[in-house]
Image (tube, rainbow, N blue to C red):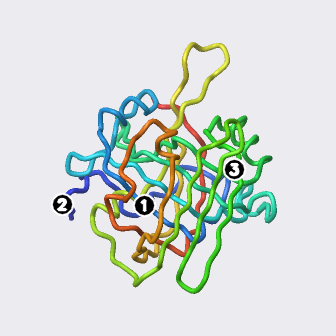
Amino acid sequence: MSVPGLPKDFARLAPPLPGRALSQQQWRYVTFVHWQVDQDRVADLLPAGTRPDLFEGKAYVGLVAFVMADAGFGVRWALPWLGTFPETNVRFYSVDDAGRHGVVFASLEASRLATVLAARVAYQLPYVWASMQVRQRATTWWYRSERRWPTAGPRSCLQIQVGAPVVPTPLEEFLTARWGLHHAVHVPGRRGSVTFWTPNEHEPWPLYRAQVLDLDQDLLAAAGLQVPPVPDLAGLWSPGVTTRFGRPEPLI
């Protein structure tokens, strides 16, 4: 049954990975905040072969703060220390000609320098090294990030209060039920870059309402977007999911 606002080909549950999982990780204590943005501006920031994924004609950008935990190779080789760290990312919502609805990362702040370097080399993802902290007191959560490398300066301070569990609206499903990422990779011997699709799967998000108590950030400005101080949408929080990633494949 189609849901108003959601594209007809939108998968509300994760499709099975096409093949063996190459990596597994946990996303814990996740907070989502979103703004509506100009779709033409977003289009300029997406890799070739993708376009802004729109909900009722509108484009969005998300700031997502969480704790990465036990990231590792395959589904058995978790790296408890190296693979566990705070992360905050800025992401756009993308779709390709094959109808795959994913995300594009403008930046991914992480506190493990070794992981940042590995991700930048192996996957050419825009990871940056930051000083970060995640704290909790009862139902209040704080996420802090200050970028250290390759350029210092951009920062984010987010405080939220977790409320009652929610059934996500169609728009909230559209922004959270994402089963892959589009990313540009520079291939030796080729001019320009090649856009890859990397699929992922996880159980449905358990979601709670999140009241934004304080937000001071310039990560979106660093990504090339100007947004108001207050998010356009109500926040969401989740205790987390376990996600598995498949093999990257080039767009054809």
Q: Going from the N terminus, do you reach mark 3 or mark 2 first?
A: 2
Gap in angstroms between the C-alphas marked 1 and 2: 22 Å
Q: Which disc number belongs to residue 142?
A: none
Q: In percent of the image, x 42 and y 77: which residue is there?
A: 208
Q: Please give the residue where the numbered disc 3 appears in the rendered image.
A: 130
Q: Callout 1: helix, strand or loop?
A: strand
Q: Callout 2: helix, strand or loop?
A: loop
**In which quadrant of the rendered image does the N terminus lie?**
bottom left
Instruction: Single out the mark in the foreground, 3 or 2.
Output: 3
The answer to which image quadrant residue 174 occupies is: bottom left
Residue 163, above or below 102:
below
Is label 3 in contact with label 2 (beta carbons under 8 Å)? Answer: no
Q: Nearer the viewer, residue 93 or 212?
A: 212
Q: Check disc 3 and give the amino acid type.
A: Ala
Q: Please give the residue where the numbered disc 1 appears in the rendered image.
A: 33
Residue 234 horizontal side relative to residue 104, left or right: left
Residue 181, above or below 208:
above
The answer to which image quadrant residue 240 occupies is: bottom right
